[in-house]
Amino acid sequence: MNRHIAIYPGSFDPFTNGHLDIVQRGLEIFEKVIVAVACNSEKNSLFSVKERMKLISELVTDNPRVQVDAFDGLLVDYVVKKEARVILRGLRAVTDFEFEFQLAQMNHAVCEQVETLFMMTSPSCAYLSSSMIKEVSKLKGDVSQFVPPCVHQALQKKFARD
Ligand code: ADP
């Protein structure tokens, strides 16, 4: 069991500056961060899991301490498979708390050695969510300040035909 690895799971549909902020800050604490795209979030998603992984990989390609992966099934099973014990999650508003609290409790109940660590959002990312980004992008709003350039381009391409 490796204490130096953190698994950062999520839908990342798409990856935002808020997600990037958590990865960067996670790297200050952990030796390695594995960004794990949830395959069960494929339904109703804008980007396929493969597209999401490619975009995230582009952003972290220079950093050997970040790995991009996808997982299917129970998150705790994936964490154990990776020989990790920490799940890293971000918290924005109070509204995130209830769901995250339940999730962390459930994961710990299912697999006792797995702990969830939360990082508070940076103030500049507090109102940032993938769903908001998709909504604004769809309506042709400028989201360039909220997402990395490659994600911005990918969003523009997705909605170009609408
Ligand atoms: P999920 O569907 O698992 O919530 P998301 O891609 O929405 O997937 O989020 C993945 C993780 O990143 C979650 O822990 C979420 O709280 C966190 N997160 C998302 N946006 C931000 C942000 N702006 N600041 C900090 N954490 C964030």
Image (tube, helix red, strand yellow):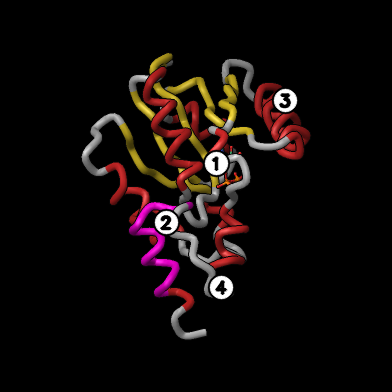
Tag in front: 2 or 3 = 2
Q: CA distance from mark 1 to mark 3?
A: 26 Å
Tag in front: 1 or 4 = 1
* 148 within the magenta span: yes
Report which residue position mark 1 lands on.
125
Quarter of the image for residue 95 reads top right
Q: CA distance from mark 1 to mark 2?
A: 20 Å
User: Of residues 56 and 76, which is closer to you in this image?
Assistant: 56
* Residue farthest to the bottom, as pictured: 161
At label 2, counting other C-alpha atoms closer than 10 Å, the crowd grade (few under 14, some 14-19, many 20 or more) is: many
Q: Amino acid at mark 1?
A: Cys
In the displayed structure, 117 sits above or below 56; it is above
Tag in front: 4 or 3 = 4
Tag in front: 1 or 3 = 1
Q: Position of residue 128 (x, y in %)?
A: 58, 48
Q: Amino acid at mark 4?
A: Lys
Report which residue position mark 2 lands on.
52
